[in-house]
Image (spheres, rainbow, N blue to C red):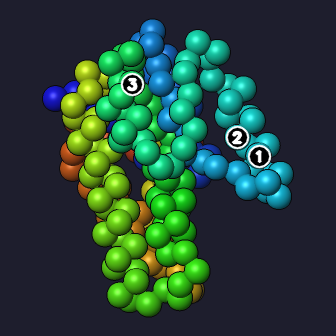
Amino acid sequence: MTEMMLITGGARSGKSNFAEKEAAKYSRVLYVATGIAFENDSEFQARIKQHQATRPTTWDTFEAFQGIATYLEQHSKKYDVILVDCVTMLVTNLFFQFLGERELTNEIAEEVEVGIQTEIRTILNAGNKSLAKLIFVTNEIGLGVVPENKLTRVFRDIIGRVNQQIANQVDEVYFVVSGIPKRWK
């Protein structure tokens, strides 16, 4: 079984920076970027370019929110470490893919969560079969107020349970605040 790590924290807490420093300790790195920008979202496109500019050019990148487990199964032997940044964007993209144009009822919310949990479990299983260290980056979004609308509450609940699912499977968990990582597990 491979070594796995989860790094969590709030937005702009320094968690990606910490994760990249951990990954830089290895020579063969795969960066799995799960944030996908739409054509009309210039702000998010700029964020992606900024992230790309900070990564070493020697790192390989796989930009996708689908097929991650299959990609890991096919390519993980080439890498010492695989950095998945970020689980929150992965879950966001999967959430809207599974929801589609449907209205978010309780039954559909449950179906969406099952689909997401299954995808995360598949990624974790592929990671366990890999020889590469896996580093997951995610946002801790459960520290704020209860969201005012159902869609946001359901999403918050799902990402909270996904983070727990990953934390239960990994060897190390770090929480980053103001650029300072604290190991919790």
Which label sits in the foreground, 3 or 2? 3
- Label 3 sits on a secondary structure element that is helix
Where is residue 66? Give x, y as percent.
47, 49
Name the residue located 35 percent from the left edge and 66 percent from the top edge.
Answer: 115
Where is residue 9? Give x, y as percent.
48, 49
Q: Quadrant of the N terminus?
A: top left
Name the residue located 72 percent from the left edge and 26 percent from the top edge.
Answer: 53
Q: Residue 75 got which mark?
A: 3
Residue 12 visible within the image: yes
Where is residue 39? Give x, y as percent.
79, 54
Q: Which residue is mark 2?
A: 48
**Quick check: 79 above or below 45?**
above
Q: Residue 74 got which mark?
A: none
Q: Residue 45 got which mark?
A: 1
**Quick check: 85 above or below 65?**
above
Name the residue located 59 percent from the left edge and 52 percent from the top edge.
Answer: 11
